[in-house]
Image (cartoon, rainbow, N blue to C red):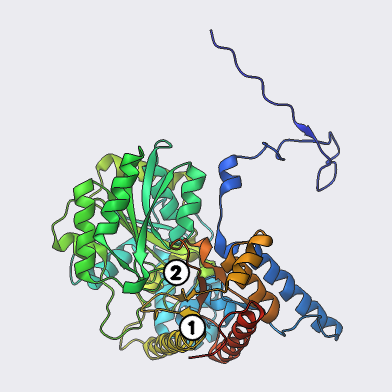
Amino acid sequence: MPTATAAKPAVDTPPANGDGGGSSRQVLCPPDGINPALEAMEYAVRGPLVLKAGRYAAALKEAAASGKPADLPFDSVVLCNIGNPQSVGQAPMTYLRQVLATIACPWLLTNPTIRAELPADVVSRAESFLSSSHGLGAYSESKGLPSVRANVAAYITRRDGGEPADPDAIYLTNGASDSVKNILEMLIRNPTDGIMVPTPQYPLYSAALTKLGARRVSYGLVEEKGWGVGVEDLEAAYASAVAAGTTVRALVVINPGNPTGQVLSEEGMAELVRFCERHTLVLMADEVYQANVYTDGKNFISFKKVVRSLKSPIELVSFHSTSKGMIGECGLRGGYMEVVNFHPHAMDVLYKLASVSLCSNVPGQVAIDVMVKPPVEGEPSYALYAKEMEATFESLRRKAAKLSTVLNTLPGVSCNASEGSMYLFPQMVLPPAAVTAAADAGMKPDGLYANELLDATGVCVVPGSGFGQAEGTFHIRTTFLPTEDAMDKMVNRMRDFHLGFMKKYGGETACA
């Protein structure tokens, strides 16, 4: 009869936060006191560089409070590491905040003066929400409020040219990230299960798969073809994974791309759907940047529309969020997923997953509701809402073009234009001396570049190695979200730094 294995004794180590009034032994400590999958997780957009940027920002704030100059070569920190628009100056949409404030403080509606000051459509929207819910402070249904899910379904139907959406197939979540993780949890059954993820990719996927103990099956995006997806590359990656004993379960597609900014064509999307049909894969469509398409002649097309037009039976789940687009409400954590062609039992398990967390946060559900059902022409708030949306969109378009243009003038740098999303992913040919210096410091070459950029300029970007990149290439990912005035200063800082970096390590210094 097998016997239980005795647990290792706790380590006698002084606690970091005091003795707690008892034993000094600790459970959650090295070398093996923490889940190794969590130890192995990496999430580049919130890594050591961001912590260093936070220390620099704190030093600048402390110096300003004391009236003394900070011992730093810059006067501000510019966070271009993450798509967090309002942290770098993007203003919130007036209508959304008015609706949210009124729902959060419903007694405002009983004050005649305040009520008269609010636009009539804000008042009616708040009253409608309050009448169909128990307010912001109460749990909603686990899948989200039915009224909001109905509005999401109506939005999807309009977006896809009348192709109907079912409110019961829509789940409201805390941002898109929670829904991604829920689907991955359903897919991964054992350590030989794998998910096909693009390279470069948003590190949520690699981190989640590491946590789940699953295999990441990387397929390359072709930089020379505007970060396109080649079906031949997909087939080769799939065959290689199967040969290695991996059971491939799903294909992740990010459209518009993060970190690469490409917008897929309908023809290319159809090829991906057919690929999933051939290999019986779930298609996970990350579509959180669907409102961020800047290039003339390019349009966002949903995978839902393509799947329906092809009459495809594949299982599809698509994700959207209030964190991106022109709304940029990252902190409200509003998101949803729509599932298509799922087995009824899978729907039951998905509901159970949602139930374990009770519900997504209700302020985020309000934000989703406004995103999918904004003011329409003829309503009091329409003119201001449309003006704010257009101003934000045109500003993002200008900043994307400006930054890519400047980057392409720098020696050793080539950058595809951002067709969509909020990022650029320029490639840098770094001098051999820089590669050697990085190795000596125990760093990746693009990590050395990003660290020295932050130290010299206060501009925080993410090394391309945190997203994955072709062997022998080096990149950084940067947002173009700071205000236009801040962007002008940032561009100058980055140009001066790059020329100095290339000179320091013996590289080319002539601008194009």
Q: If you read the primary sequence from the N terminus, does the residue marked by circle 2 or circle 1 appear first?
A: 1
Which of discs 2 and 1 lies nearer the camera? The answer is 2
Between 86 and 482, the one lying in front of the other is 482
Residue 226 visible in rendering: no
Where is 201 relative to 213, above or below?
A: below
Residue type at mark 2 is: Pro
Q: Return the residue at label 2.
A: 259
- SS at mark 1? helix
- SS at mark 2? loop
Where does residue 148 sit, x and y in percent of width and height? 36, 64
Q: Residue at x 62, y 71 (%)?
A: 433
Where does residue 339 sit, x and y in percent of width and height? 29, 54
Q: Residue at x 25, y 42 (%)?
A: 344
Count neighbours of disc 2 (C-alpha within 10 A) and say few if under 14, some if 14 to 19, many if 20 or more.
Answer: many
**Residue 219: quadrant of the picture:** bottom left
- In this rendering, position of residue 30 left or right of residue 391: right
- In this rendering, position of residue 151 left or right of residue 314: right
Where does residue 270 sit, x and y in percent of width and height? 19, 63
Where does residue 447 sit, x and y in percent of width and height? 60, 66
Between 134 and 308, the one lying in front of the other is 308
Residue type at mark 1 is: Thr
- In this rendering, position of residue 288 left or right of residue 108: left
Q: Return the residue at label 1.
A: 94
